[in-house]
Image (spheres, coloured by chain):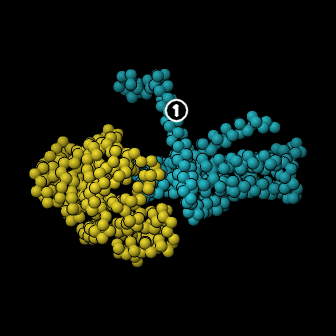
Amino acid sequence: MANTHTGTGAQSETLSTNPVVVVRGIGQLGRSFLREVGAMFWFIAHTLDETIDRVRQGRVPFRAASFFQHTERAGVESVPLVGLVSFFLGLTMALLTGYQLERFGTERLVPGLVAIGFTRELGPLLTGIMLAARIGAAFTAELGTMKVSEEVEAIEAMGIGPLRFLVAPRMLALFFLMPCLSTISNIAAIFASSLVCRAYFNMAFVYSIDLVRDALLIRDIITGILKSLMFGLIIGGIACYRGLTVNGGAAGVGAATTSSVVTAITVVIGVDTLYNTIYTIFFPT
Amino acid sequence: MTAPSSHVAELRDVKMQFDEKKVLDGVSLQVNPLDRLVIMGQSGSGKSTILRLILGILQPNAGSIFFKQFEITRLRRRKLQQVRRHIGMVYQYSALLSSRNVRDNVALPLEELTDNSRDEIDEIVDAKLDLVGMKDSKKLMPSELSGGMKKRVSLARSLVMEPELILFDEPVAGLDPVIASVIDELIISLTEKSQVTSVIVTHEMESAFRIGTRMAMIYQGKIIEDGPPEQFKQSNNPVVAQFLSGSTEGPILEGSQDAIATK
């Protein structure tokens, strides 16, 4: 480094103002980001390859019991959390928008607004964030601990593909469960908005549901499902990748778990934004 | 390039380094059929690395590694997985899957790699657990087992695929002398009964001389002595002599961090 100052203050000032250092720092960040993205891509590709390879040999890639165990943990046990959070958010959204729209006499738009908002956007996004925190963290910690205690290496040493044995059932469980949980999130929010409409805006429950049916388009539902599937794959992939690349014992497992949750939530929101941008370009109305 | 068929495993001029640290510096070693080869050396000398290289879990920086006629370093993933089925591994901390009970741990390779029915798998698992005296503990979880019991289950797991070579990484580390002797006897009797070759990594001298039919000592990345246990006892090599005696005076500690600590 060109910097020859000995004082800490002078050094940090030089570091922050020297454009070469700043550019180098940005370059290093970019490089490590691209390396991570590449590694994660190959991780998912190798998992698919190992799984498909196993199917080609005419064998099941993993036991059904293992898959259902993960679907139960990721799906069934997440229902109360997803349902409750979505219900409260649906209530809040209906209340806040309802009072604003009431001033213009358009409060009957509330059920449709909540339904579209959740089906296309908030349902998959909220579910993704909750699953990243609840299940992604659990997967990372579990696989990280297995890695640290040499269990993953033992599986590999037996001639068993650890990616198809450990990663594939977890990723697939999240992939298939995400749309189901998203749907539960949507239903909870729509139900909550119907309750608000009944209580505050004198709309019959059946009328609210009719308004929801009128407002929702098939493409809203498809968009929500596609997003959910993508988010499931992303959360599962990141959680398992972080778990299997743990280094440094218990502290490493902790760091990987935090990193897994932060990365998954950031990537999910980023992908959601990208999806919405592309969607708006191709379907502007 | 093929290995002579007389060797179960062979390392040829293997070099391995982690970051800046050179661990193996041109190691050549042959494992002959029915050998109980004990590899000795200081902590961090690369003993366990040799086992992981034979399994293909680590890739060397240079050199070749063979298991029978297969060059491990050149095998593709699928072939490597097939070759690994013929090698058993017992880890230092047993590496039992904590979410599975004893029966399921031992049955895992059979369930995943064979077409055996559940009854056939149960029969094999019972037989192997019986060999290690753990038949009555099938339902226990790894967290309910003592260190010695875990080692025995791990040994049973390594035997279920009828391997031709078993690798032991510090099989008696952390066990009391009595249980360590039990594990040693078990290793001897099982390898003799099953006619299986084994490589044992340890720095427990008593255990090494009890188990080994052949010994090799690794020092500063090289094999400095290789021969029967009697040869080791009479060795003129000062490193071997110091290692066997456990003395603090000698070439091993010269210039090392441990030497500085003792001063």
Image coords of residue A85 (percent x, y): 68, 55
Q: Which residue in the rendered view is the most extreme toward the bottom?
A: B136
- Classify residue B101 as left or right of residue A234: left
Q: Residue at x 39, y 22 (%)?
A: A2
From the viewer's perspective, is residue A133 above or below residue A271?
A: below
Q: Which of A45 and A112 is in front in this view?
A: A45
- Mark 1, chain letter? A
Judge the density around disc 1: few (<14), some (14-19), many (≥20) Cα neighbours within 10 Å: few
Which element type, helix, strand or loop, lies under badge 1? Answer: helix
Q: Nearer the viewer, residue B121 or A179?
A: B121
Please give the count of numbered marks on the rendered protein. Answer: 1
Query: The N terminus of chain B is located in which quarter?
Result: top left
Instruction: Give the chain coloured cyan.
Output: A
From the viewer's perspective, is residue A154 above or below residue B151?
A: above
Residue B248 visible in the shown view: no
At label 1, which amino acid type do we have? Gly
Q: Which residue is drawn at 35% across and 52% down?
A: B69
- Classify residue A178 as left or right of residue A135: right
Image coords of residue A282 (percent x, y): 76, 36
Q: Residue at x 71, y 50 (%)?
A: A225
From the viewer's perspective, is residue A16 above or below residue B160?
A: above
Image coords of residue A68 (percent x, y): 60, 63
Instruction: Give the chain coloured yellow.
Output: B
Question: Mark 1 — residue?
Answer: A30
